[in-house]
Image: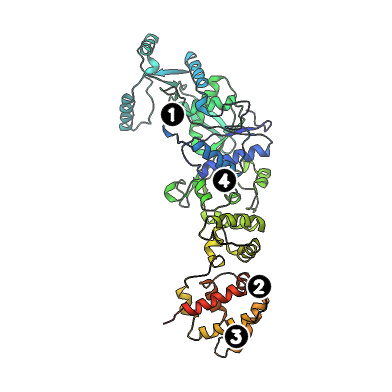
Amino acid sequence: MDTSTNNVRVRFAPSPTGYLHVGGLRTALYNYLFAQRHQGAFVLRIEDTDRSRYVEGAVENLIETLTWAGLEYDEGPLRDGPFGPYIQSERLEIYREHANNLVREGKAYRCFCSSDRLEAMRKEQEKQKLSPKYDRLCLRLPPQVIEENIQKGISFVVRMRVPDNEIIRFHDIIRDDVEFLSDRIDDQVLLKSDGYPTYHLANVIDDHLMQITHVIRGEEWLSSTPKHILLYRFFGWNTPMFAHLPLLLNPDRSKLSKRQGDVAVEEYRAKGYLKEALVNFVALLGWNPGDEREIFSLEELAKEFSLERVGKAGAIFNIDKLNWMNFEHLRRKSDQEVLAMLKEELAHSRFREHQLSDEYLFKVIAAMRVRVSFVKDYLEKSPYFFEAPTEFDHEVVRKRWKRDTPAHMEQLVKMFRKLNKPFPTKEDFEKALYETLGNLITASPDGGLIHPTRLAISGVGVGPGLFDMLYILGRDESIRRIITAIEKIRIE
């Protein structure tokens, strides 16, 4: 088998059944990275032959999500290449022709069994604790009966004729040598009664005709691979290299599913995760660079990635790790990049009517950078930078706002009013506060003004440095907020 990486062609072949699962994103990413590493082609193929599961708009959503993640494909829908069309429902005649060829050569056969008979057969096998498998009744039909059934218009499927008592072996880049006994493989349906192919037939034909060199897909397809190996042999075609990726698991080691959290890429995007963080995180679900590095750009991943460093064991989806990566990638963004994202977030928030200058927002970004993991955190963790507080944290009021606090705060206001510029420096505010504190005999030296001032201007007891906050808000706004707090805060 050819294991070279010359003229690499890989494909991501999802079904348009809804949103893009994070497992699908990982499959697409690994194919993309492998193609990039070897200067190959990354093909997007839409496998829409199961019409019962087709979701309107899913193809468009899929393409848009891949584009958002930075996984630009070289050939596929809307980006035609020499092996199109790239949507399987537009290739039906190709599949029918190949299925008919297999029937003529005795490598497949027509099955006229009704769904009722197949269901009864399955129940009987279960009763006898046998593995569900077609009993090959139609394989034994005489040619004249087959012809009569066709003439009568009896619907049929085409099944592959799996050889008896044979060991089917193949090499998997991740799992090494794998083998299956043919007697345990069912005579798989290749062409359904509606003329549409099953995944197995269409997959093999398309991979061959599109000259796919490496099939990189999830572990759930490992048991189907011997069927595909047989089809390649039946058609007289060379097989591609296979690499079956490990399962994605919840922290309890169950298979990653909607029951235990979000699984759709679109859901993480909507929650504000950066594409760089999500791609970085997904890349490390099964692959490692061989050292302690964890933060990568897409370009860096493409330089480092290799299938040989993908493990066999299931990969744990750790949301805390993803959150940390989002923090790290956000921290690495320039102020200008964060500004653009913050303005977009503000435009869809309750603060959208407020007129805030870029200069002001840059100050907010500088103050909050180490405190936010998401752009939305600027709004959720520090709303006081965008509007004055209307409520004050009760617990902080109880601990920090004493009976003599209003009088002390009035003295602070007088001192702030002496500052002769609307936007004093942090040092100016600090000097004014400590000068006020020095004049107050009853104030505690460890924060008799600092905590109440923070509460007054923000409504809460935590946040960036107090003098950073005062500097950002400016003299007049800070004074307004302190006066409002004096008027509104009441203690028992």
Residue 423 — which label? 2
Mark found first going from the N terminus, 1 or 3: 1
The residue indicated by pointer 3 is 437
Give yes or no for contact between labels 2 and 4 (Cβ–Cβ under 8 Å): no
Residues marked 1 and 4 touching at CB (< 8 Å): no
Neighbourhood count class around disc 1 (C-alpha, 10 Å): few under 14, some 14–19, many 20 upward: some
Q: Give, as a three-letter code, the residue at label 2.
A: Phe
Question: In this image, 219 relative to 173: left or right?
Answer: left
Q: Position of residue 387 (x, y in %)?
A: 53, 66
Disc with the residue nearer the chain's start (2 vs 4) = 4
> For the N terminus, which image quadrant?
top right
Where's the C terminus, which quadrant? bottom left
- The three-letter amino acid code for the residue at tag 1 is Arg
Q: Is residue 483 left or right of residue 336?
A: left
Name the residue beneath numbered marker 4.
286
Q: Earlier in the sequence, mark 3 or mark 4?
A: 4
